[in-house]
Image: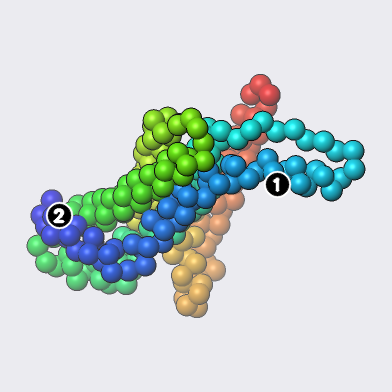
Amino acid sequence: MTGLVAFLRKELTEIRRTWRLWVIPGMLVFLGLTSPVIAVLTPALVHSMAATQPGVVIQLPAPTALDASGQFLKNLDQFVLIAVVIAGAGVVSGERSSGTAILVLTKPLSRGAFVIAKIVSQVMLLVAATALGTAACVGMMALLFDGSNAPRLVTAVALWLLYASLLVVVMTLTLLFSNWSPAAHYSFLGLLPAMHDALTGESQASSLGWPLTTAAAAIALGTAATVRIFEQQEL
């Protein structure tokens, strides 16, 4: 892992000087502050909507810290995972396609260190941002609710963080495979570089045969498997 520490330091410096420092942490802090507020306001909003319909009565239990924690976790799944994918997309394959990867790899930096530094820097940012957002959520819950759900929330968020870190690794692996010639030519992963080629006018219909065929097959098989699994499950 030649040059890992130095290149990781460079990646962290780049994060501090770009929009990535503010987007994910800012989103997590915002969600941490607003999730308990939404949990508190939801019953009142539902009641006011029901009041506009004559004869409709909706009774909801008083919101609790558990409701606020659940709202925060739901926001992590719905919004933050998308932001993680967008922020991390192309961190390795983008530098490779632009040629900057060649420049840094000509220095005393191994390819393994290059990839690991990219992944570790993303995970470090995610961990720090998640800690801030969770702290904001716990603090807001302490203000709005009598009971505290902090220990269970921290455990749940830690499990989500592990899942999100896995997603970062899988996404990086997928993007690297899409730049590998055999995978790009003979599988649906070739659709990723094909999008760039189509935009620049370099796409050729003859090269899209396997990616389109394998993508259609994967969609059909995935749909069939989903239907089959759902049919076997108890409702």
- At 49% from the left and 60% from the top, the residue drawn is 191
Q: Earlier in the sequence, mark 1 or mark 2?
A: 2
Rendered residue at 84%/48% (across/down): 52
Q: CA distance from mark 1 to mark 2?
A: 52 Å
Which element carries disc 2, helix, strand or loop?
A: helix
Q: Amino acid at mark 2?
A: Leu
The crowd level at tag 2 (other Cα within 10 Å; few <14, some 14-19, many 20+) is many
What element does badge 1 sit on? helix
Question: Residue 66: x percent and y percent?
Answer: 52, 32
Q: Is residue 234 left or right of residue 22?
A: right
The tag on residue 45 is 1
Residue positioned 78% across, 47% down in the render = 49
On the image, numbered disc 2 is attached to which residue? 4
Name of the residue lying farthest toward the bottom: 201
Q: Residue at x 87, y 45 (%)?
A: 53
Q: Report the disc number at residue 81.
A: none
Q: Can residue 85 be seen in this snapshot?
A: no
Other residues around mark 1 within 10 Å, as few (<14) / some (14–19) / many (≥20)? few
Query: Residue 123: x and y, percent?
Result: 31, 49
The type of residue carrying mark 1 is Leu
